[in-house]
């Protein structure tokens, strides 16, 4: 997995490519740790992300909870159909603000 990011004021945009799975989820978690307490908006772009496992969803959920606690928001963009189905089945599509 490759992580590209850009910070614009208090919004962090994270573009993921490859797979967000049990092996790469800790890398994303480590990357997000110094940022998530300081920002108000987190945008994930999944255009180049081929697969998201339950470990990846846990990282997203943890970030979402931290942002909500600090009155922030999180959005997911360019979510593929298989991942979108999983998010819809769990109700996380609404919580994560799927675009």
Image: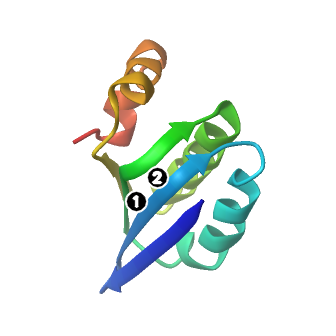
- Name the residue carrying label 1: 71
Rendered image quadrant of residue 32: bottom right
Seen from the viewer's position, the closer of residues 23 and 64 is 23
- Name the residue carrying label 2: 68
Tag count in the figure?
A: 2
Judge whether 59 appears above or below 93 on screen.
Answer: below
Q: Which residue is drawn at 41% across and 64% down?
A: 15
Q: Which residue is drawn at 76% across and 43% down?
A: 22
Residue 23 percent across, percent down from the top left: 78, 50
User: Position of 34 compared to 36: left or right?
Assistant: right
Seen from the viewer's position, the closer of residues 37 and 13 is 13
Identify the residue at the far left of this view. Answer: 99
Judge whether 14 appears above or below 9 on screen.
Answer: above
Seen from the viewer's position, the closer of residues 92 and 19 is 19
Circle 1 — which element? Answer: loop
Whole-number angstrom distance, CA of label 2 to CA of label 1: 5 Å
Classify the position of the N terminus by image quarter. Answer: bottom right
Judge whether 27 appears above or below 89 on screen.
Answer: below
Q: Residue at x 39, y 61 (%)?
A: 72
- Decide: marks 2, 1 in contact (CB < 8 A)? yes
User: Position of 94 compared to 19: left or right?
Assistant: left
Circle 2 — which element? Answer: helix
10 Å crowding of disc 2: few (<14), some (14-19), many (20+): some
In the picture, the disc for residue 80 is none
């Amino acid at each position: 997995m490759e992580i590209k990011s850009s910070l614009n004021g208090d919004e962090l945009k994270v573009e993921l490519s490859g797979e967000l799975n049990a092996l790469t989820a800790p890398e994303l978690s480590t990357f997000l740790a110094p940022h998530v307490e300081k920002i108000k908006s987190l945008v994930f772009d999944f255009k180049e992300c081929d697969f998201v496992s339950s470990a990846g969803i846990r990282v997203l959920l943890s970030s979402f909870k931290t942002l909500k606690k600090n009155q922030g928001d999180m959005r997911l963009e360019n979510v593929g159909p298989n991942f979108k189905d999983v998010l819809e089945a769990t109700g996380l599509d609404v919580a994560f603000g799927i675009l």
